[in-house]
Image (spheres, rainbow, N blue to C red):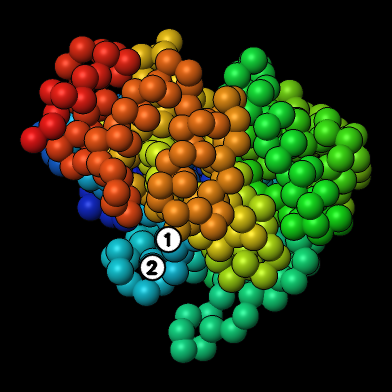
Amino acid sequence: MSLRFITAEEAASYVNHGDNVGFSGFTPAGAPKAIPTAIAERAKAEHAKGNPFKIGMFTGASTGDSLDGALARAEAIAFRTPYQSNKDLKSLVNAGDTVYFDMHLSQLAQELRYGFLGKINVAVIEASDITEQGEIVPTTGVGILPTIARLADKILIELNHKHPKALRGMHDIYEPLDPPYRREIPVFSVSDRCGSEVLKVDPSKIIGVVETDRPDEVGGFAPVDAVTAKIGENVANFLAGQIKAGIVPKEFLPIQSGVGNIANAVLGSLGANPDIPAFKMYTEVIQDAVIGLMKDGNVTFASGCSLTISPSVLEEVYADLNFFRDKFILRPQEISNNPEVVRRLGLITINTALEADIFGNVNSTHVLGKQMMNGIGGSGDFTRNSFFSIFTCPSVAKGGKISAIVPMVSHIDHNEHSVNVLITEQGIADLRGKSPVQRAQIIIENCVHPEYKQLLWDYVKLSNKVYTPQTLSASFGMHINFAETGDMRTTNWGNFIR
């Protein structure tokens, strides 16, 4: 069949109120832009006529403003999963005006196939190339692409000429069978391929191709500051010590790193530490620091779900694809985050905590236990199945008014059984083989900001001679005090004793 080229507005006409729509990409990388914007405009027009228009949305992770932002501002989102970071969408979610459910990223594709989440009516896919035989070359992010393309009744393509056709060969598209027929994921080293270099779809389902020339909406990363630099240095020194102790093999192990400014600083510190050998990455997001480490020879290969790099760095990669062609590969998140593969490869996982408590529980998602920040993302996929897990965070926030280390986290995403090491700019707490009392001691001494140490020691003393020194009436005292006064430092435990 021949491809049918249409406008974004015509593409949007195939998306109807009540449809569930799956979008390609992972972060703003690989996320469609022109068609979602046109869907948002259609929603506004229907609302102006007094007609309802909302869609259910499945994505790989967060997206760009032209997708999440445009549809949120148009009040066109009935529900959204599995992860988001757009400020307009977040406002709707926290106001209760849009249904949002947080999910481990590795689980979304299979739960769609299992039928847990309803059907997919339309898949919207960004491509760098497409053939009449239904071979699609994705762009910089894969996400849940294979599953939404196979399950959807209709497929709309954004053919984005900003991304070269030469990306063909830099993807590994694989979708596992469902139980009881599932086999092992055949990835036994970071660079192993298990699937196809292109996405193959039924060409009869492709109802239109929209040509665009719009860049990924990836923002830049904040420069490394004193706090993030010290966190990175602490992580690198800890891992170098693990190699010297013989706990980590001298050849080192693959690294998984979350996305963001702290992750960028940590990766830079690993590359700068002479005691850390060149390493490989098996991760979700390949970001700016990884590209620099590849150029310097410190990262030899990276497997990820997306190439989430700032525009100028992406231009560098595209200008030198021959150099990078054998240095990274992009896979669906069901493979990049797969617990089976994570455990087999023995990943050292490094993720960011929003807050942690003195016993090692970690909150990645909720502010004061009730306001959604972004979502759990893939941190749980990696943490529970790692060789060992590291969580990082600054010890304080809001100019010292908030301690990131509290008596009890206001929401638990990763419990104490999954968190092996906690690192702040203050120091390192190795929690392996420690009782609750021992964990509290090492976290307070090594990771807590000096302005909060005595406060947390006083909390521990409220409940002596017990297995876990937790006092329920006071456990959220610091959170309550912040909500009432704007500063955790003024907490008086006597106000909470019952």
**Residues at circles 1 and 2 in contact by the CB criterion of under 8 Å:** yes
Q: Tell me the residue that label 1 is attached to.
A: 108
Q: Which mark is residue 303?
A: none
- In this view, 371 is above or below 169: above
- Going by the picture, which residue comes out furthest to the front? 465
The N terminus: image quadrant = bottom right
- In this view, 486 is above or below 349: above
- In this view, 451 is above or below 244: above
Report the residue at 17% width, 16% height from top. Answer: 484
Q: Residues within 10 Å of mark 2 (few under 14, many from 20)?
A: few
Tell me the CA gap for discs 1 and 2: 5 Å
- Going by the picture, which residue comes out furthest to the bottom? 180
Amino acid residing under circle 2? Glu
Report the residue at 75% width, 30% height from top. Answer: 268
Residue 485 pos. (x, y %): 21, 12
Residue 379 pos. (x, y %): 50, 49
Q: Tell me the residue that label 2 is attached to.
A: 111
**In this rendering, position of residue 184 left or right of residue 110:** right
